[in-house]
């Protein structure tokens, strides 16, 4: 441990400086300040090839390095904090604090460590997220929020995350103490149940904290949706609209929930700026996810992967805790190390996760074309998406392999054109 402490302190300092000052470095490039002068119109070359708008290209040049930095720096930061001795020192400090008030309460120390450590991470990344989520979005015309509104949403997100972090990680360390050999079995089952419950509660409890949600009121559009659902052999119970325009100019739609809680959610920006045919294509795509049970399969797949990962985590923790200076596998001072392991495992599995996601999106796209029978509206929809959301039309293969959860817009348009040919 002592062998790594001094280099780890230096690395930790460097990483904190990088996190805090990378937004400033991006701002100093001046690209964001010039966003108003750039065109958002997608360029179609004489051979029919689509090229991202100058504005989308500029935004991409700023956000891609920040995205790469986030996935690489985060696990290094956690490991540097662990090997610098910071986690052990913080656990000792909390034990002294709790020992004066709640004598003998080990789980109180565990909970306090989890909450304070995660809160410190959220606060450390606040400037980074503020620049990426507010400053850039305002400069490029994608945000309609005030700084106060953005900070209010950030505060709500942090509170929800702290509740989730506290519940999951405290339960994890409680199981480590109670069931030192069998905890992966129980933890895996608990994680699966939590994922299902969270998915069910999100549209009911969490989304209304950030948006005003209302039923779709357009009677003509509702009739089109019912007819579309009939052609797909499905029953649609709920189509809801959220007031996204209060926060963003971007458009989106998504499917969420299971059973009676399932619903299709549309941004009001979609209803305001798109034709009925285009909206029908969007809805058909979301019905495709419903039809193929993508969300349920995703929860079950992630649950199964997490279950296997927990057994791997037990194997790793049992072999590394002495080298970390911990009292045992259940020592909460090893939390940064565990978070780093999870982050690295997620990063390594990201290409597989994204490949599965892209496959599901292609299925939903084909379903949308077959049910709506509107390929022209499909193509127009994604061209307009690219312009309004400032989305890149295409990207290098490595970027799609690592980061893209959806096929690129160029690939989706090409698929629609080939579908017409078939």
Image (tube, grey):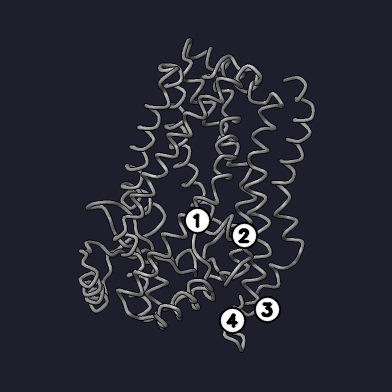
- Whole-percent x, y for residue 82 in the image: 66, 28
Image position of 135 with respect to 199: above or below? below
User: Which image quadrant: the C terminus?
Assistant: bottom left
Q: CA distance from mark 2 to mark 3?
A: 27 Å
Between disc 2 and disc 3, whose residue precedes? Answer: 3
Task: Tell me the residue at 43%/32% (across/down).
Answer: 168
Q: CA distance from mark 1 to mark 4?
A: 24 Å
Label of residue 49 in the image: 4
- Whole-percent x, y for residue 256 in the image: 34, 55
Residue under label 3: 37
Q: Nearer the viewer, mark 1 or mark 2?
A: 1
Q: CA distance from mark 3 to mark 4?
A: 24 Å
> Tag 1, which secondary structure?
helix
Residue under label 2: 399
Image position of 15 with respect to 378: above or below? above
> Tag 3, which secondary structure?
helix
Between disc 3 and disc 4, whose residue precedes? Answer: 3
Residue under label 1: 355
- Whole-percent x, y for residue 155 in the image: 50, 46
Residue 318 shown left or right of residue 60 in the figure: left
Callouts 1 and 3 close, C-beta under 8 Å: no
Task: Pick the residue in front: 401 or 34.
Answer: 401
């Amino acid at each position: 441990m002592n062998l790594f402490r001094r280099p780890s302190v230096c690395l930790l300092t460097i990483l904190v400086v990088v996190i805090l000052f990378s937004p400033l470095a991006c701002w100093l490039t001046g690209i964001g300040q010039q966003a108003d002068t750039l065109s958002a119109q997608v360029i179609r070359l004489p051979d029919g090839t689509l090229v991202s708008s100058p504005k989308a290209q500029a935004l991409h040049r700023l956000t891609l390095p920040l995205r790469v930095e986030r996935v690489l720096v985060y696990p290094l930061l956690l490991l540097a904090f662990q090997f610098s001795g910071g986690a052990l020192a913080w656990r000792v400090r909390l034990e002294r604090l709790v020992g004066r008030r709640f004598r003998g309460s080990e789980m109180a120390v565990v909970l306090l460590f989890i909450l304070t450590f995660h809160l410190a991470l959220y606060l450390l990344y606040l400037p980074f997220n503020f620049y990426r989520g507010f400053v850039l979005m305002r400069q490029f015309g994608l945000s309609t929020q005030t700084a106060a509104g953005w900070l209010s949403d950030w505060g709500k997100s942090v509170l929800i995350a702290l509740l989730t972090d506290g519940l999951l990680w405290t339960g994890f360390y409680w199981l480590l103490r109670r069931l030192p050999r069998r905890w992966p079995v129980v933890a895996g089952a608990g994680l699966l149940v939590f994922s299902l419950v969270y998915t069910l509660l999100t549209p009911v409890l969490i989304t209304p904290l950030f948006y005003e949600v209302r039923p779709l009121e357009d009677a003509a559009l509702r009739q089109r949706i019912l007819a579309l659902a009939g052609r797909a052999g499905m029953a649609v119970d709920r189509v809801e609209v959220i007031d996204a325009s209060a926060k963003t100019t971007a458009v989106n739609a998504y499917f969420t929930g299971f059973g009676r809680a399932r619903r299709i959610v549309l941004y009001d920006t979609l209803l305001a700026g798109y034709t009925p045919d285009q909206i029908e294509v969007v809805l058909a795509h979301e019905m495709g996810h419903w039809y193929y049970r993508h969300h349920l399969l995703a929860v079950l797949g992630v649950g199964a992967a997490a279950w296997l990962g927990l057994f791997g985590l037990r194997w790793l923790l049992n072999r590394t805790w002495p080298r970390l200076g911990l009292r045992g596998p259940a020592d909460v001072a090893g939390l940064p190390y565990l978070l780093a392991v999870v982050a690295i495992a997620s990063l390594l599995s990201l290409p597989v996760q994204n490949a599965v996601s892209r496959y599901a999106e292609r299925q939903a796209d084909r379903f949308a074309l077959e049910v709506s029978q509107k390929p022209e509206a499909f193509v127009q929809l994604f061209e307009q998406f690219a312009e309004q959301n400032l989305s890149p039309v295409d990207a290098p293969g490595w970027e799609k392999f690592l980061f893209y959860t959806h096929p690129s817009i160029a690939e989706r348009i090409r698929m629609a054109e080939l579908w017409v040919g078939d």
